Amino acid sequence: MDDQTGISSTTPSYGFQHEEEEEEEEYRADKHKNSLMDEAEDLLAREADAKAPDDDDILDLAGGAKDALERHRSTLPRTEEPQLDVTEPEQEPSSTSKPEPEAVKPAPSSAFGDATTKTTKSEEKDEKTRVTPSQSNSCCSLVDLLYWRDLQRTGVVFGASLFLLLSLSVCSIISVISYVALALLSVTISFRIYKGILQAVQKSEDGHPFKMYLDQDIGISSELVHKYSDTTLVHINCVIKELRRLFLVEDLVDSLKFAVLMWILTYVGALFNGLTLLILGLIGAFSWPVIYEKHQAQIDHYYGLVNKQIKDVLGKIQAKIPGSKPKTE
């Protein structure tokens, strides 16, 4: 009985001692946890006093505290694991940190306004210096024809024009138009019949041989008519004003020059007719630019000498005419 009582008396004291050890272990765990949290808070406070808190730094500190708690939790027994609610601390703006000033962005309206003004100025300059395609193309084509840039094209134009003028000098204009129309029709009809027979033999469906030319628009636009009519009207008005000035003797010297020119043309008309002059003019138009381009220096030299002599003669004649005054250049 004594042995049983001794054993029974020691058993409760051993259980009470085990409970005290568990409480001490929990107390030490809580104390360690609180110390880690205090250290994390102190680090956060020092960082906040030094500079504005960065998101990455706060996350790193919170992550470090969380890792330390996880390591401590792993050392405890699974049955005695405390229920800890570890959450990341919310980011609170410190009073000492100052928000960084935002970069001032330019207003989109002003930026677009400047761009539009620049584009409008450039477009105005382009419009001032721009030449219409029709004018540039017509000038370039005429210059290329007169200077024989394209030999084949210039040869066709020059040969056809010369042949037409020579035909008009021999035959009447009605005969020339009739012969030219018959020659053109004979060529087109023969080609049309040839292509039709060829398509029937080969059993092909190529269609009309002149379909490409039939589909083209060859009509004259009203803008083109107005353009050239306005230009012609300006030249006609200038000629009328000049003839009025010459015939009404606004300037005596100019009227005398015109009279001398008409007197010379009477001899020219006795030697040549109008078609001959047109033929000579056509030949000169297609030959003189090339000759002048090759021998420009010599031609300019002799032209200056002749022009000087003519001015001297006209000056002497004008000095002898009473009431006439030389023009100031």
Image: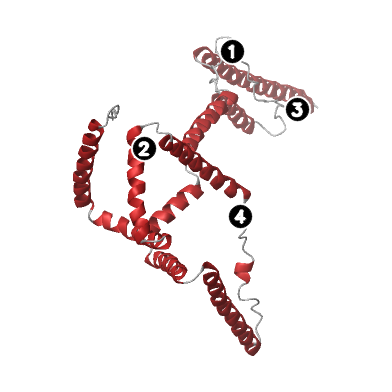
Q: Residues within 10 Å of mark 2 (few under 14, many from 20)?
A: some
Secondary structure beneath dot 4 equals loop
Verify CB contact (< 8 Å) between mark 1 and mark 3.
Answer: no
Marks 2/4: CA–CA distance: 41 Å
**Percent x, y for residue 256?**
33, 39
**Residue 111, above or below 154:** above
Residue at the disc numbered 2: 255
Marks 4/3: CA–CA distance: 133 Å
Residue at the disc numbered 3: 7
Secondary structure beneath dot 2 equals helix
Which residue type carries mark 1? Answer: Ser
Q: 296 and 208: which one is in front?
A: 296
- Give the label, 2 or 1, closer to the camera: 2
Marks 1/3: CA–CA distance: 64 Å
Q: 190 and 131: which one is in front?
A: 190
Lower position in the chain sequence, tag 1 or tag 3: 3
Q: Residues within 10 Å of mark 4 (few under 14, many from 20)?
A: few
Q: Quadrant of residue 192?
A: bottom right
Residue at image location 21% in from the left, 46% down from the top: 306
Residue at the disc numbered 4: 220
- Give the label, 1 or 4, closer to the camera: 4
Q: 143 and 313: which one is in front?
A: 313
* In the displayed structure image, the side of residue 14 where residue 178 appears, left or right: left
Verify CB contact (< 8 Å) between mark 2 and mark 1.
Answer: no
